[in-house]
Amino acid sequence: MSTTHARRTHPYLTALAVTGAGVAAAYLVSTAIPVLSALTIAVVLGILAGSLLSLSDETRKAISGVTKKLLRAGVVLLGLQLSLPAVLALGPGTLLAVVLTVGITFLGTIGLGRLLGVPRGLAMLVATGFSICGASAIAAMEGVVKRKDSDVATAVALVTLYGGLAIAAVPLFGGLLGLDAVRIGEWAGLSVHEVAQVVAAATPAGGAAVAVAIVIKLSRVVLLAPMVAAVGVHERHRPTEGKRPPLVPLFVLGFLAMAAVRSIGIVPGFALDLAKVTCTLLLAGALFGLGCAVRIGTLVRTGGRALLLGLLSTLLVGTTALVTLAVLG
């Protein structure tokens, strides 16, 4: 009995050890280079680990199981980063600009994906990441859509590439367009993908720009839960041979519950800081695990069309954000 137990336990111990090492490395690199998200680094390290390490099928299966648990726990904790009163303080015009930008970018990117012949799962993940909050949104959405693990890795890579380009583009074009510091911050918060990238893009305009950029960015994150839930409902009505996705995933409800707790103001500051770091580690572990299942050959074959989709989606979110802010903000 003990031998059987050991055989069952060993792959999970190996999975935890490999994932833990990947998360630690990703977090250390992101600490040294803050512009690089730990989530992005984690998925890259996962792809390398899956390709270079001789992992058994049992270990890979165990990593997949660990990945799902880490993902859901991370998305739940992400809710503690949202303060609804701070978001509502932006005013109805800005909030409407946020909703329109997210909706137009999401639906527009899916439409562009169809025109380009990009796989549906990849287009859905790119649409989610570019319209809401980068790798975190991709990690949340991947649980309710039919996709390949290589689609997740590709979507995260695109977020990294085009979000990095936006760091330079937003202050440059903001200056050329004659935008003031606060407007540049609003544009960054409404159009750039990752939180770290938003901060980097707004920093040249000063502290006031950074402050408003972060709040607007978090207002986009608020829309993550309803978007994942809506897609989950839609996916249930699509013909499928496998298990149907849940009507509303439990981790999405947990996300909303944590956002409510944060908004009440009963969580002390040190707990919020701890939860933020823990959330990053959990999501990094999830994306590392997804990366381990990726085959580089498959990733490369989707490259050209995916790159074009990422470019067009970036132009779409940037233009839509600028126009809606000008009209409503």
Image (tube, helix red, strand yellow):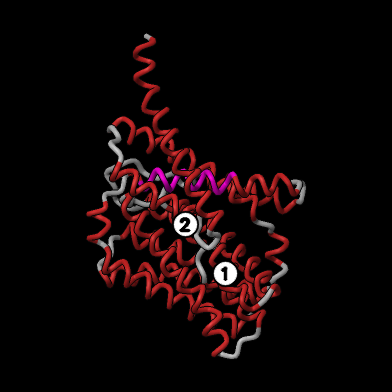
Give the residue at x 47% y 38%.
20
145 lies above or below 108 = above
**Mark 2 crowd level (few <14, some 14–19, many ≥20, 10 Å Cα):** many
The reply to whether residue 36 is visible in this rendering is yes
39 lies above or below 10 = below
Q: Position of residue 212 (x, y in %)?
A: 67, 71
Tell me, yes or no, whether the two marked residues, 2 and 1, touch with CB atoms within 8 Å. no
The answer to which of 125 and 237 lies nearer the viewer is 125
Q: Main secondary structure of the magenta part?
A: helix
The answer to which of 255 and 55 lies nearer the viewer is 55
Give the residue at x 43% y 40%.
67
Horizontal side of residue 328 vs 108, given as left or right = right
The answer to which of 191 and 89 lies nearer the viewer is 191
* Residue that extends furthest to the front in the rendered view of this protein: 32
Alpha carbons under labels 2 and 1: distance apart: 17 Å
Q: Position of residue 311 (x, y in %)?
A: 37, 74
Q: Position of residue 292 (x, y in %)?
A: 34, 44
Mark 2 is on which residue type?
Ala
Mark number displayed over residue 200? 1
The reply to whether residue 71 is visible in this rendering is no
Check disc 1 and report its element: helix, strand or loop. helix
Q: Which residues are magenta?
A: 278-291
Horizontal side of residue 226 vs 53, given as left or right = right
The answer to which of 94 and 174 lies nearer the viewer is 174
N-term-proximal mark, 2 vs 1: 2
Horizontal side of residue 200 vs 17, given as left or right = right
Mark 1 is on which residue type?
Ala
Give the residue at x 55% y 60%.
34
Q: How many marks?
A: 2
